[in-house]
Amino acid sequence: MLWGTILLWIVGLLILYVVIFAAVKDGIDKSEVGQLIKTKYGVKDEIVTVSDDEIENELEGEFNKK
């Protein structure tokens, strides 16, 4: 009985977190301040991926400079 109650609390808090996170993110994106920041600073939601080879080459270049 105790484990069921704990599990329900965890699931409920997780759902609450997701709902609040989505609402806040959507609210900021649609607000005037959010739009101003996007236009002024060009903030984008793209993620840049870097390969392991690029990281190794950069680190080797830094190591060889010293």
Image (cartoon, helix red, strand yellow):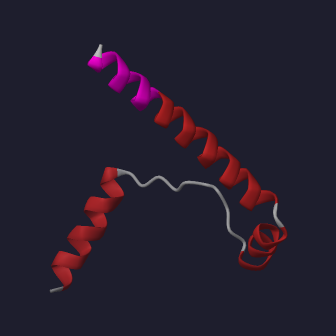
Q: Point out the image quarter for the N terminus.
A: top left
Q: Quadrant of residue 62?
A: bottom left
Q: Is 44 one of the magenta-colored residues?
A: no
For the record, the magenta segment spans 2-11
Q: List x then y, in percent, for residue 49.
A: 47, 52
Which is the main secondary structure of the residues drawn in magenta? helix
Rendered residue at 42%/29% (across/down): 9
User: In the rendered view of the protein, which quadrant contains the C terminus?
Assistant: bottom left
Q: Residue at x 67, y 54 (%)?
A: 24
Quadrant assignment, res 33: bottom right
Residue 7 is covered by the magenta coloring:
yes
x and y percent of residue 41 in the render? 71, 78
23 left or right, relative to 40: left
Residue 12 versus residue 2: which sits nearer the camera?
2
Which percent across, then down, holds residue 19? 63, 40
At which x and y percent is residue 57?
28, 64
Outermost residue toward the right?
A: 32
